[in-house]
Amino acid sequence: MLPKNVLFIFLLFFSVALQAQSDRITAQKALIVNDTLSPEEVMLKMTLYNKWGTDPISAAEWDQIKNILLTQNAKAPTLRDQYFICYADCNKYAVLKEIGNALYCIDSFYKKVKALNDDEQLMNVYQLYINTYEQSNMIDDALKYTRLLYALKCKNKSHAEIMEFSNAFVWKFFVYGREKNDSVLIQEAQTMGEKRISYFEKHPSDQSGIGDDYKINIMALLRLKNWSKAIEISKRALKTFGLDYTSTDEGYLNYRRKLFSYQAVAYARLQNRDSALFYIKHPIMYQNSATDRNTFIPEQNKYLDIEELLERVTVHFVLNEHKKAADLAFHAAYSPYKVKTADYREFIKSKFANVFLAAGMYKEAAEGYKLMAQNTDSTSREEITLLNEKQIISNRLEIANINEINETKEEIAQKTLERQILVRNVFIGGFALLLIFSGVFFVQRNKIRKGKKLSDELLLNILPYSIAEELKSKGNAESKLIDEVTVLFTDFKGFTQLSDQFTPQELVAEINECFSAFDQIMFRHNVEKIKTIGDAYMAAGGLPTSNTTHAEDVIKAALEIQQYMAEYKKAREDAGKLFFEIRIGVHSGPVVAGIVGIKKFAYDIWGDTVNTASRMESSGEVGKVNVSESTYTLTQNTFNFTYRGKIAAKGKGEISMYFVEQ
């Protein structure tokens, strides 16, 4: 009986899957053959059908859609049909990750369209290029054709007509800018969007998507750190659409919630705590019923949507209320009242790994960083693996080596006391014996002092002074978020190839000579050495105690390394020996600093600032000190710089970079 039931269930699921596939193809066909819709309108609607739930249309289904187009006309396919045949082929190749074949299809169709000198068809071709490049995450190429499409659509159009359709381009420029981390492109989107807002505020009868314009504009301003302007635009949006606290329309309320959230974040960034908390905790922010994407708040007896949750955690974190921020994120991801959908819970865990870390919730931070590593590229994963669970699961260090030293000191002290008692008793027996045992006492006391001095020196060789003192007094050291430090990375050019030409002894000796010199340079300039990884050297200024000279200190150290390596190279060349050449990168920003590990512990730093400093090194040139815009801004009045322009950095998009001149 059981096998028959299993077979029946299998056939039922199979038939449902076939029906779903048939429905999708039917829906696509209905759109394509609808001659009342322009290709652009069809493209927008078809995009909605590209995913049904989490099940994307397969390559085989796209082939079926293409065959419908090939067979619906008795004669040769029309140009409109050829366009959608190309569209179906591009989507099929996108599923198969064959970008070359997709571009070949578009190039072939482009040649036909170009000969017709038809702007409408040319815009369709540009849209095909944009879709294909976006599916392959080739943002620069997608941006190129988006600009061409926008220019062509604006051709011979009035200002009012341009305002009608420009919303989609504002959104694309913003998204591309966000993906590339390009503030110039985000500023362009913000400026375009504000023009639309000003136009539609003056022409309310012509409003077309102005609600989205307000949201995109505020998101862009938050990215650009223009907090005051973001608040102004949010208030203009509320004035345009009004605010009815008694409304029960969820669409209406959700839009106002988002505007309140934006204002809260902006006020928090301005350190206006009262205003930030007023907006983020306003009664309008709560919902009355449960969904898959909200969490129950017991004290309110209501629900909080994940979007408002994210903004609230961000507000508390920006206001340095790390425990409140972490508790709120924990509540949504782990508590009995957690968000129902597992995907949303994992998003919260990865999104706020740094919040958990700053609040000392190391187990949750470790899980968050692991999830982040699964959903990011390999460039970031290099740094994230440094924060695996073994390293941050507990900051209560089992400092075995130090304990052994302390135990030894106690044993020595006890033995010394015993000898002192013996000396006192023997003193009665004779002055000569007293001198002997007095000598023993002083020898032992010197040994104790030397042992304590050695243990302290060993500890200070591993950890900064303030961290070592905290560790000795409390048995642990708390992780800290430091708002402004400057991180330095160095790396030897072609190290792997050169290392094969040295003997092991020569290789270690050369690296030791260079790194020992670097250590002395760091000490002279009050810069903290963090660690070495192979032939890479990492240091940072402004920690563990914050200061205002960290950027200058690190650049001075970098220039001295540059000078040292130039003299080292000349000396090796004159002697006819192999030599190393160095790249140096510097970036300033916030980091989390602390001790990780339970054995062979180390003081370390984490955060996007570390990643960016590494990119400054790898994007630099041999013998040069390459710095980011944030470091340049802090030191532009102290040093001379040469602007390099925006340079593509792996995993970071284009970043403004500068060379420091001696």
Image: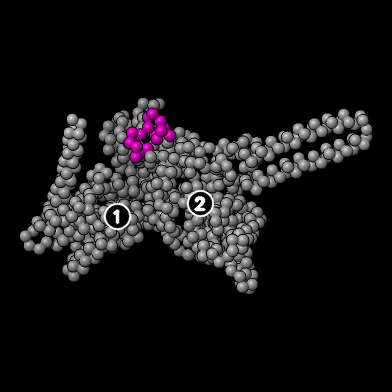
Residue 38 visible to an observer of this rendering = no
In the rendering, at what x and y percent does residue 661 appear?
Answer: 56, 65
Q: Earlier in the sequence, mark 1 or mark 2?
A: 1
**Is there CB contact under 8 Å for labels 1 and 2?**
no
Task: Find residue 515 and name its label.
Answer: none
Looking at the image, which residue is at 44% across and 43% down?
A: 369
* Residue 416: quarter of image: top right
546 relative position to 26: left or right = right
Q: Secondary structure at mark 2?
A: helix
Q: Quadrant of the N terminus?
A: top left
In depth, the one of 615 and 435 nearer the eye is 435
Q: Secondary structure at mark 1?
A: helix
Residue marked by disc 1: 135
Q: Residue furthest left?
A: 74
Residue 531 visible to an observer of this rendering = yes
* Residue 276: quarter of image: top left
Tag 2: residue type? Val
Span of residues in magenta: 330-345
In the image, residue 279 above or below residue 635: above
Residue 337 in magenta stretch = yes
In the image, residue 433 above or below residue 73: above
**Residues at marks 1 and 2, CA–CA distance in whole angstroms:** 30 Å
In the rendering, at what x and y percent does residue 354 appear?
Answer: 47, 42
462 relative position to 144: left or right = right
Residue marked by disc 2: 610
Query: Dot 2: few (<14), some (14–19), or many (≥20) neighbours within 10 Å?
Result: many
Looking at the image, which residue is at 54% across and 64% down?
A: 500
Tag 1: residue type? Gln
